[in-house]
Image (spheres, coloured by chain):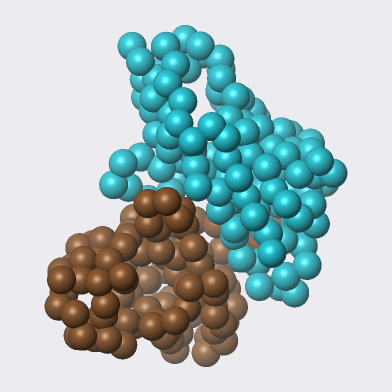
């Protein structure tokens, strides 16, 4: 979507390796989020950020860490990838809850 | 904990039919509700955003209503077209989250419109 990009779009990695996904925005929005989408579970929040260096955990944060050193970038790191982390990962941004949320195109991650 | 349910999980209709998708949520203390569309293998596209003080929002052939007290929202699609085929997701933001502004999603309704 315009103003938000995720990279890479697809990635295959081996169990036990570290992986970093990137979300980049050009909208200067305060809030950024990482969700994962799995069949039968829908979209679940992993971590979110409400400002530079301000982050917090979502409902499925185990095995994931995040960093936000600049307003425009929100990184999601899998410290040691496991097969259960095979999923589609979406980043979302928002200036404020009254305005709503915009989602990126997603990253399809496969852990083998 | 807020839970969002969407019924039905899947729906198949002939082209031209008017249809209603349902969304319910357990905690009525919401700030707003947003409907999204997701095409296979794609991201989420925002369709309509309803603030808690509003009863409905309209965009083209789409109309979304909100009854906060009963914990329900509906998405009405008029004169459905094959291009409307997609998964429709409902999500809410709680008003008691202390500014964290997190979306809680339902699992979606997969709509198929047959020519």
**Where is residue A52 drawn, in percent x and y?**
53, 86
**Where is residue A92 drawn, in percent x and y?**
47, 63
Residue A32 visible in the snapshot: no
Q: Is residue A82 above or below residue B55?
A: below
**Where is residue A72 drawn, in percent x and y?**
43, 76
Say how many tags the image has: 0
In the drawing, does residue B115 fall left or right of residue A29? left
Q: Is residue A98 above or below residue B99?
A: above
Q: Residue at x 42, y 51 (%)?
A: A40
Residue B5 visible in the snapshot: yes
In the drawing, does residue B91 fall left or right of residue B41? right
Q: Residue at x 59, y 58 (%)?
A: B104
Q: What colour denotes chain A? A: brown
In the drawing, does residue A15 fall left or right of residue A38? left
Q: Is residue A73 above or below residue A8?
A: below
Location of residue B86 by image quarter? top left
- Camera-side residue: B93 or A99? B93
**Where is residue B92 drawn, in percent x and y?**
65, 53
Image quadrant holding the C terminus of chain A, namely bottom left
Q: Residue at x 54, y 72 (%)?
A: A59
- Camera-side residue: B18 or B60? B18
The chain shown in cyan is which? Answer: B
Location of residue A24 by image quarter? bottom left
Q: Residue at x 31, y 70 (%)?
A: A84
């Amino acid at each position: 979507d315009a103003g938000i990009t995720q990279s890479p779009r697809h990635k295959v990695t081996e169990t036990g390796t570290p992986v970093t996904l990137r979300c980049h925005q050009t909208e200067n929005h305060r809030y950024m989020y990482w969700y994962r989408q799995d069949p039968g579970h829908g979209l679940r929040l992993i971590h979110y950020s409400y400002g530079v260096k301000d982050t917090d955990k979502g409902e499925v944060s185990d095995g994931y860490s995040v960093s936000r050193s600049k307003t425009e970038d929100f990184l999601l790191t899998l410290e040691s990838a496991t097969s259960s982390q095979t999923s589609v990962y979406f980043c979302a941004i928002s200036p404020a809850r009254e305005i709503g949320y915009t989602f990126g195109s997603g990253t399809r991650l496969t852990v083998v | 904990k807020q839970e969002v349910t969407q019924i039905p999980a899947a729906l198949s209709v002939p082209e031209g039919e008017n249809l209603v998708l349902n969304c319910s949520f357990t905690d009525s203390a919401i700030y707003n509700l947003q409907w999204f569309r997701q095409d296979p293998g794609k991201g989420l596209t925002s369709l309509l955003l309803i603030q808690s003080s509003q009863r409905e929002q309209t965009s083209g052939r789409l109309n979304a209503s909100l009854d906060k007290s009963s914990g329900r929202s509906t998405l009405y699609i008029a004169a459905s077209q094959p291009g409307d085929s997609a998964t429709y997701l409902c999500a809410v933001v709680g008003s008691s989250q202390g500014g964290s502004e997190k979306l809680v999603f339902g699992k979606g309704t997969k709509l198929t419109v047959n020519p």
